[in-house]
Image: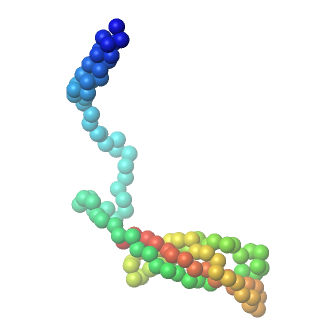
Amino acid sequence: MKKKLRKLLVGVMIGSMLVPTNVWAQSQGTGGAVSGDTGDGISPRISVSKYVEIERRYMFLKDVPQYYYYSYYDYDYNTTLKGTLVLQGTRDYDEGVVAYYAGHCSGSI
């Protein structure tokens, strides 16, 4: 009895793999065009990165964060580079504190 049941189950499994199924991908019309997309197909993107050092001024040492999100337009690559910079150190000045941040900012061209 077990052998017949096993043969039947194996036969059903193999038979279900042989039956063609109708699978079609259809657009739902919910997608939008990427800005600057000309519709000429796929355009490759290249990731670029630059090491950045900046300084920020704060009134009090307690206001200086450990990490600083930084975004700027880079004219060498003609794109916006973004990244989270890490506090490297602080220094007192006349009316507060200067914080020095450094790290990598990246973007795509």
Horizontal side of residue 47 vs 25, given as left or right: right
| Depicted 2 relative to depicted 103: above or below | above
Quarter of the rendering containing residue 1: top left
Extreme residue toward the bottom, this view: 94
Q: Position of residue 33 (x, y in %)?
A: 35, 56
Q: Position of residue 81 (x, y in %)?
A: 47, 74
Residue 56 appears in the picture as rendered: no
Q: Position of residue 105 (x, y in %)?
A: 50, 74
Residue 7 vs residue 103, the one in the foreground: 7
What residue is rendered at 73% in x and 84% in y? 97
What residue is rendered at 27% in x and 60% in y? 42
Residue 32 appears in the picture as rendered: yes
Quarter of the rendering containing residue 93: bottom right
Residue 15 vs residue 9, the one in the foreground: 9
Q: Position of residue 86 (x, y in %)?
A: 61, 75
What count of labels does the image hold?
0
Horizontal side of residue 16 vs 72, given as left or right: left
Horizontal side of residue 56 vs 75, given as left or right: right
What residue is rendered at 53% in x and 71% in y? 83
What residue is rendered at 44% in x and 75% in y? 49
Horizontal side of residue 2 vs 103, given as left or right: left
Name the quarter where the C terminus is drawn. Answer: bottom left
Scheme of image coloration: rainbow
